[in-house]
Image: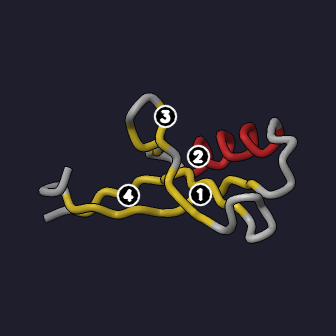
């Protein structure tokens, strides 16, 4: 059984936001936003963070591992 690493983009909302603190993986077009390479995931986070304009929200990358049987 081999492990597959994926880099998932997460959105984080601060406790000071109108709806309170929260962290969730980003869903785009009905699917989890992930990349096979950390550099591509970080580039997407940088792009998302640069266009925000909201001080209570930011994006990060988190490593997700799954076995080949789970995919």
Callout 3 environment at 10 Å: few (<14), some (14 to 19), or many (20+)?
Answer: few
Which residue in the protein does label 1 denote? 61
Q: Is residue 7 left or right of residue 51?
A: left
Q: Is residue 8 left or right of residue 23?
A: left
Residue shown at the point (17%, 56%) measured from the top left? 70
Task: Kindly report the distance in space between the C-alpha atoms of the residues bearing marks 4 and 1.
Answer: 12 Å
Kindly state the secondary structure of the residue where label 2 is placed.
helix
Which residue in the protein does label 2 denote? 41
Q: Earlier in the sequence, mark 3 or mark 1?
A: 3
Residue shown at the point (20%, 49%) measured from the top left? 71
Callout 2 environment at 10 Å: few (<14), some (14 to 19), or many (20+)?
Answer: many
Residue furthest front in the image: 18
Q: Earlier in the sequence, mark 4 or mark 2?
A: 4
Label 1 near label 4: C-beta < 8 Å? no
User: Where does the N terminus fall, quadrant-wise?
Assistant: bottom left
Q: Earlier in the sequence, mark 4 or mark 1?
A: 4
């Amino acid at each position: 059984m081999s492990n597959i690493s994926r880099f998932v983009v997460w959105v984080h909302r601060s406790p000071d936001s109108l709806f309170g603190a929260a962290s969730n993986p980003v869903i785009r077009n009905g699917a989890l936003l992930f990349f096979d390479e950390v550099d591509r995931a970080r580039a997407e986070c940088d792009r998302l963070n640069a266009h925000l304009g909201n001080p209570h929200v930011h994006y990060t990358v988190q490593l997700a591992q799954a076995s080949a049987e789970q995919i």
